[in-house]
Amino acid sequence: MSENSNQGEMKRSLKTRHVSMIALGGSIGTGLFVASGSAISTAGPGGALVAYIAIGLMVYFLMTSLGEMATYLPVTGSFATYAGRFVDPALGFAMGWNYWFNWAITVAVDVSTSAIVLRYWFPNIPSWVFSLIVLLVIFAINALSVKSFGETEYWLALIKVITVIIFLIVGLLTIIGIIGGHATYLEKSIPKAIKQVFWRILLFYILAIFVIACLIPYTSPNLLGSEATDIAISPFTLVFKRAGLASAAAVMNAVILTSVISAANSGMYASTRMLFSLSLTKDAPRVFSLVNNRGIPMPALLGTTFVALLTFLSSIFGDKIYTFLVSASGLTGFIAWVGIAISHYRFRRAFKKQGHELSELRYHAKWFPFGPLLALVLCILVIVGQDLKSFANLDWQAISVTYMSVPLFLILYCYYKIKYKTKVIPLDEVDLTPHKVEK
């Protein structure tokens, strides 16, 4: 590396506006723009609303749990570090590698998807050309500085938020017409982001589902599509077309492109930081803990990019390998959420056990222990319920593909536990001493 390298020193350059918009924009993606139609078609309008409200509550409690731990102990490894300190080092190890693997694969999936979306305008250019260009752009954004990542994510997220707002205005005006026709500091930025994001997400998602349900029959075959390539059957596109916007498909294609690039950009950032954190705890090669003079962990970034590139190339030369890698990362996000809920429950109990007062916390998560316990139960239900149809039909191949992430996580956990003979840390021995924060 040409720049001066040192170990374990990264810069914090994300301001409150970055944190709030990244968190908000990160929750708005193809799941809302496209897959929401499939949810309404499968569960009906009422079922979809209940499901989105339940997931919204789960995410809120997980955000407050993570916010309480992050303001008290701000670390790069986030929930993997918390799991290792508050529960069991084996759990932290498994969660860290599990999360890194998930995002490294997700980056590859997103750059492949971006190529499919771009071919909407440029059908004669090979997809792999677009994928490589997007991957290089994302690498460059993350290699420049944390600020460049934050600014890019801010504006990409803003595009998605504006689209949802316009959609709600157009949709609600259409509904009215139908009715008329018929009659920088963590202790400040994180709590603020949590409050803003929760209510805005709840508003965006619930109102969006409500508008779609009011304007498009849930029996419509157009709601069955849930792939990012089906731009024309996005519920958003259908509502815009109903309002007389002929160019809706092209507009939504552009918005979905920003969503995919934003997801890949966030994935690259998150996986790079997780690999960096694993190296600091000696759970990954030491070279990945090196950073340059701009505060960027370049070896970790290069390693993650290399894995994403290999995964992307496997989609071209070996579909079976690509499918295996994608399936293996399928449920890792929910597994991470389970770990967050458990870690927060243990953190708070250890905090009280060791004689600390809640007033010492910079941010106090409400509804404890109900919040993390409810989030834990909901996460487990979501994991188990991913493919109940295959269980009913005893389709073992489909079951193995859907739930592959679970045994892989358990293998990582058991490997570390057996090798280092770790145990669940007693509450009175949990390390609650804040470490030095990266500059």
Image (cartoon, grey):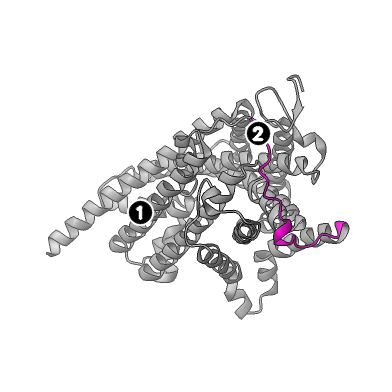
Place of residue 56 in the rendered image (x, y in percent of width and height, measured from the top left): 45, 59
Which quadrant of the rendered structure holds the C terminus? top right
Q: Which mark is residue 194?
A: none
For the point 38% across and 52% down, which residue is it?
A: 199
Which of the two discs, 2 and 1, sits closer to the camera?
2
Which quadrant of the rendered structure holds the N terminus? top right
For the point 34% across and 54% down, which residue is it?
A: 238
Q: Which mark is residue 438?
A: 2
Residue that badge 1 annotates = 203
Q: Work out whether 323 lies above or below 278.
A: below
Is residue 219 visible in this depiction of the protein? no
Instruction: Tell me the quarter of the picture where residue 287 sits.
Output: top right
Place of residue 273 in the rendered image (x, y in percent of width and height, measured from the top left): 67, 40
User: Which amino acid lies under the numbered mark 2 shown in the image of this protein?
Assistant: Glu
For the point 55% across and 55% down, which residue is it?
A: 65
Q: Which stretch is magenta?
A: 420-439
For the point 39% across and 42% down, which residue is it?
A: 250
Q: Which label's residue is closer to the chain start, 2 or 1? A: 1
Q: Secondary structure at mark 1?
A: helix
